[in-house]
Image (cartoon, rainbow, N blue to C red):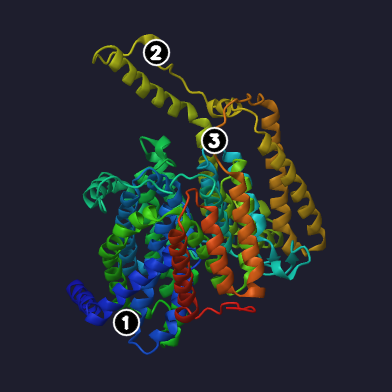
Amino acid sequence: MERSIVMELLGYFVNALTPLNILMALGGVVLGTVIGALPGLSATMAVAVLVPFTFTMDPATGLIALGAIYTGAIYGGAFAAILVNTPGTPSAIATTFDGFPMAKRGDGSLAVTLATLASVIGGLVGGVFLLLLSPPLAKVALAFGPPEYFWLAIFGLTLISALSVGNTLKGLLGGCVGLMLAMVGVAVVGGDIRFTMGTHMLLGGFDIVSALIGLYCIPVLIDLVATPDPHLKVEQGNRGIRLREAFGIAWSSKFNVLRSSLIGTVIGVLPGAGGSIAGLVSYSEARRSSKHPETFGNGAPDGIIATESANNATVGGGFIPTLVLGIPGTPPDAVILGALLVQGIKIGPTLFTQQGDIVYTFIFGLLIATALMLPAGLLIGRYAYKSIASIPKTLLVPTIAFLTVVGSFAIHSNLHDVQMMLALGVIGWLLNRCGFAPSPIVLGLVLGQIAEQGFVQSYLIGNATGNLTGMFFGRPISLAIVVLAGFTLLYPLVFAKRKEKARKRALDAARNFNDSDGATTLPEADAPKPGFEPFAGVKKLMAQPRDAAGMMLSVLLIIVAVLAFAQTSSMSPMGSVFPSTISVAIIVLSIVLLGLNFLRKPAAKTAGHGAGEESSSRRYALVAVMAIWVAGVPIVGFGCMAVLAFLLLARISCYEAMTRKQILGEAVAGIVIVGGLYLLMAEVLLIRMPRGLLF
C-alpha cells in the first residue's frame, strides 16, 4: 500500500517536470520576484491580472504559473526591503530591520543572498508540509475562533512593540494608532461609516499598500535629499553574491532556519494571519534565543534568515486551508481559489482523492518553482545591489519617487490613494523624528480588520451567553496566546539585567585580556554582582532623558483619541465597541508615557551641530514638488507631470555642479525611465492611467 502511494506521488512529480510546466514555474518566479520588488505592485495584482491567461492551459500548468508568481512575489519583497528600506510586500516588514542596515554598511549583496537561501528553504518546508500533512494541519485552522484571531492580532502588535528597542510604550501606541487608521471608513462588522470627516475620499479607508509605501518610502526619500552622502555603501572589490559566505552563515543558523520555517508554515495555515505575523513571530523568537540579541536591528544576518524563511513558508501553509477547506488564507490564495473553481475543480477534503492528479502536480510544481527561485534570485541579486548602489542620487531619488506614486495609484487606479500615501509619508517622517517607528503603525493597519472582526464577534457571543470574560480569557488557545503576548512585553523589562551582565562580562574579559598581556583572570572587584533584579528594565527606562517631542505627541494623541471616543456615541453597538476600546487604550498609554517623562530628568543641552550639514530646505522642496505633482495630474496629465517632477527632483537631490551635457543626459534618462514604467503599467498590466490636458 505504502509503495503504491510512493509510486503514485512519483508519477505526479514526473508530470510536473514537463518542459511547459518548468517554463511556467521559472517565468512565474522571475515575474513574481520583479513585481514583488516594486513597492505597490502586489502578488495579488500580478496573480489577478494573469488568471485569464491560465484558462486556456491545462489546469495543473495554469495553477503552477499562478503559484510561482505568488511565491516569487513574496520573496521579491525582500529586495526593496533591503535596498531601499521599503517592504515590497507587507510580509517583508521585519526584513527592513536588519536588511537595510546591512546594505548601508556595504553588505547588501550578502543580505540579498541570505534572503534568497532562507526564502527557498522556507518555501520548500512549507511545500513539503502542504504535500504530506494537509488534512491534519487544516484542523488547526478550524480550532481558531474569533477570540483566537483577535488575540493573534494583538500578539503580533506586542511582538513588534517589544522589538522597538527602548521604545516599547511608543511601539504599543504606534500599533494602536494603526488600529485606529484601519477603522476609518465602513466598519468591517455592522457597516457604520466612521471617522471619514465628511469626505468621500476616506469612505474606503486607508489602503494598506499605500500606507506601507508612504510610511516606509517617503521618509527615506526626505532624508535622502538632505545630505550629499550616498544612499548605500558601495562594496569594495568584486565580491559578487558571496554565496559561500552566505551558505556558511545559513548552516551555522540551521536551527533558526528550520524553526522559522515551521513557525511560518503553522501561521500560514491560519486564514488571514499571513506572512507579516509569521515574519515577526520568527524574528522575535530568533532574537530571544540569540546569544547576541543586541545585534538585531543593526544588521544581524539571523534577522533576515528568520523573517524570509518564515514568510515564504506561509505560501505552502496558506494553501492548506485553501485546498482542504476552501478557506483562502490571503488575497492571492482567494484569486487562485477562484481559478480552481473556474477550472471545475471541487475544493474540499475529497479534492486529494477525486482530483489528485491536478492538485499533486500543482504542489510538486510549486516545489519546483521554489527550487528555481535559488538560481533566478541569485542571478537577479548579483546585479540588483550593485545597480542600486551605483545609481547617482539625481536618478535614484526621482525614480523611487515615481515608483511610490505609480505604485500607490496602480492598486485601485485612484489618485486619492496617492494623496493618502504622500500625507501618511510626511506624517510618518515626523513621527519617526519623535521616536515612533513606522512598523507598529503599518502592522496595526494590516491587522486592524482581523483584530476588530475577532473582537466584535467575541464580544457579541460573550454578551449573548453571559460569559464575556470566559469568551476572551477562558479558551485554552486564547489563554496561551495572551500569556505569550504578556511574556513578550515583560521580558525586556524583567530580564534587562541579565543582558547587561552578559555584556559587562564580555567587555570586562576583553579589557582584562588586553591589560594583563593575555591573562584571562577577572578581578573580583569587576565581577558582576549576582542576583535577580526584576525592575532593572524599569530603572533603565527611567534613567533616559525627558522626551519633549514624545510628550507633545502624547498630548496630541490624547486629544485625537478623546474626539474619536466622542464620535462613537453616534455609532451602532457593533460599530462602536472596538474604536471606543482602542481610543481608551491610546489615552491610557499616552498618559503613562507623559507620566514617565515627567518623572525623568530634563535632557541636557548639547552644543553639537551634528545635523548642521543636513539641508531642511531640500526636504521641504521634495515634499512640495511631490504635492504639486499629485495635484497636477488630473489637470496636466500623468505622463507630463511625472517627467516634470522627475527633472525637478533630480535638481533637488544634486549637490554637484553639472554640465549642460550631463543635465541633458539626465533628462533623457528621466524620459526613458518614466516612459518605460508608464508603458509597463498601461500596456502590460492594463492599468488605466489618468489623463489631463496633455499626455
The amino acid type, in three-letter code, at marker 3 is Gly
User: In which quadrant is the C terminus drawn?
Assistant: bottom right
As measured in the structure, the alpha-carbon distance from the residue carrying label 1 to the one carrying label 3 is: 50 Å
Task: Name the foreground residue: 33 vs 396.
Answer: 396
Relative to 532, is 154 above or below? Answer: below
What is the number of the mark on residue 635? none
The amino acid type, in three-letter code, at marker 2 is Asp
* Residue 187 spot, x, y in % from top left: 69, 66
Q: Earlier in the sequence, mark 1 or mark 3?
A: 1
* Residue 400 spot, x, y in % from top left: 49, 60
Q: Which residue is mark 3?
A: 166
Relative to 404, is 546 above or below? Answer: above
Per the image, label 2 sits on a secondary structure element best described as: helix
The amino acid type, in three-letter code, at marker 1 is Thr
As measured in the structure, the alpha-carbon distance from the residue carrying label 2 to the one carrying label 1 is: 67 Å
Q: Residue furthest front?
A: 660
Q: Which residue is mark 1?
A: 61
Q: Residue furthest bottom?
A: 56
Disc 2 to disc 1: CB gap under 8 Å: no
Specify few, some or many for label 1: CA neighbours under 10 Å numbering under 14, 14-19, or 20 or more.
Answer: many
Disc 1 to disc 3: CB gap under 8 Å: no
Could you tell whether 388 is left or right of 539 in the image?
left
Q: Earlier in the sequence, mark 2 or mark 1?
A: 1
Per the image, label 3 sits on a secondary structure element best described as: loop
Task: Name the foreground residue: 55 vs 141.
Answer: 55
Could you tell whether 68 is left or right of 437 in the image?
left
Q: Which residue is mark 2?
A: 526
User: In which quadrant is the N terminus drawn?
Assistant: bottom left
Q: Is residue 103 visible?
A: yes
